[in-house]
Image (cartoon, rainbow, N blue to C red):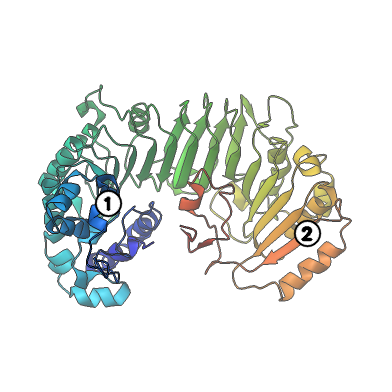
Amino acid sequence: MEDIADLLLCGLDFFMMGETMLSFTQSAFTNLPHPPATTAAPLSGAVPARAPDGVDRISRLPAVVLRDIVSRLPVKDAARTAVLSKRWRRVWRTTPLVLVDAHLLPSGSIGTGRRRFSLLGNDPRDLFGGPRGLADAVSKVLAAHPGPFRCVYLLGTAMETHRDELELWLQHLAAKAVQELFFMNRARTMDNKAHLPAMLFRCTSLTKLYIGFWWFPETASITRTIAFPYLRELGLFSLVMMVEDLTFLLNRCPVLEKLLIDGSRVPVCLRVRSNSLRLVEVCQCLAAEITVANASRLERLLLWEAWGWYAVGISNMPSKIKIGHAPKLGFLGFLVPGMHKLEIGNTVIKAETMASPNTTVPSVQMLALQVKLGTRIEARMLPSFLRCFPNVETHYIQSENDDYKFWGPQSTGTGKLNLKFWKEAGPIECVENHIKKMVLREFRGTRSELDFLKFIAEHAKVLEKIVILLTHGHSPSDAIGTNLRTNMASANWANACCELMIFQSPFHSEGSVWCYLAAFDLSNPEPFDVSKCIGGKCQSH
């Protein structure tokens, strides 16, 4: 299926974006769920409309089948079906429509990279066929179709210059029962002042909502009785919103199951107290506190570079991850020992904390940690973190570069660790009796990494597989891979049948990697597995 980012993330306006804004926009656009309609299979395909005998059998299909066909077409092709016959005209008018604004671009502007830039020319007004071209096209579609709208992607318009259209669009969408809405402001800079229209809260039929690059409206201007009674999936990208705004929003989503917060521009203070939420994902955010309490259905808490913060700027200072009542929490990561202050119940986990019923989360079966294995202040917390999750069966480690330091407490106390440290760590229940698969990413071949792997191999009695992803630029056949195999061959393996697997990194650069789409899929059994992702994009969709 096509990637709509390839249609939108090019052209003059995007070339003129600031580096930070472009990075966040690319992250948002490339990781949105794919639309159910695609230009990859247009109406004017190679298959003739009529069979060799001249009989139009497609038009004889039941109306429900024809509506399903039309609903999978790009909006321009869907509209063209109305000229085929009166029956097709009725089909088009009664089909829950899919509107993707990128599909309304002039054919000459659809392209990528420099090719598309040259097609658009050097005048910013040329973008999307004129200064108002795309916005006008969206307005015409929303006015022409009686609804309902099954799915709407509005990603390509600089919203702050189209305030009147925004109100009208949202009035149409609310009246025509939009089900899924992706509503992104195409801003050039991070300091844009576009405020999310309060009219959005009139779209009470929504089941899925993604919004990005807005200032959240004043909650005092929103009627308190407004709610999203059917909303099950919510994505928030680079919003400016206060703690009370997030609370206000979540309190109006009584059946919300999946929550994504990406690139928040204010520190996130998230308190998950919903009995409906099954998945929470926080990405590239300043995270002051994330609390899970009274979350009886929560299955996954996924953190991708959820940093701590100081008033003077971003750093890896401690942020709090507090886990209370979450009996179904099975997937947790990436926690960062030494940066994330982990609190279970009312107990803050410290290096000397031992396992007890009050300090463990027995439901977690897949745990991911991000750690500098050669930095004492972080690595010494690792045994304590592992003791908190006694039933982990799959363990991911993102090995961080010990030479790279943020400003903060990690800049001191970096005494090297050795195998003796791990042997003196004491028993760890999940390591000795439960872990079946260990994955270590960004392996650099340091002594501390080798010592940690040898400790795991010599203590994990049921371990079946150790998977090593080498850092960028190395292959299993080079010196790092050879040294790894030599060191692990000298280990006294607790399970002689355990398999050691070494792979080259699938990524183009060193560093943390994730797949939003893969991780946000509750049917995916391993949300931390990046083997099918290239450049942060899930390749299985």
Marking on residue 37? none
Q: Position of residue 145 (x, y in %)?
A: 14, 46
Q: Residues within 10 Å of mark 2 (few under 14, many from 20)?
A: few
Q: Residues within 10 Å of mark 1 (few under 14, many from 20)?
A: few
Residue 245 visible within the image: yes
Relative horizontal placement of residue 292, taking residue 386 as reference (left or right): left
Depth check, front residue: 94 or 187: 94
On-image quarter of the N terminus: bottom left
Seen at 67% across and 55% down, the residue is: 439
Relative horizontal placement of residue 40, taking residue 494 as reference (left or right): left
Seen at 70% across and 43% down, the residue is: 393
Marking on residue 61? 1
Rendered view: 257 above or below 184: above
Residue 74 visible within the image: no
Depth check, front residue: 283 or 152: 152
Rendered view: 175 above or below 191: above
Depth check, front residue: 347 or 493: 493
CB contact under 8 Å: marks 1 and 2:
no
Q: Amino acid at mark 1?
A: Leu
Q: CA distance from mark 1 to mark 2?
A: 55 Å
Rendered view: 362 above or below 535: above
Q: Position of residue 455 (x, y in %)?
A: 81, 52
Marking on residue 499? 2
Relative horizontal placement of residue 385, taking residue 117 as reference (left or right): right
Which residue is at the far front? 53
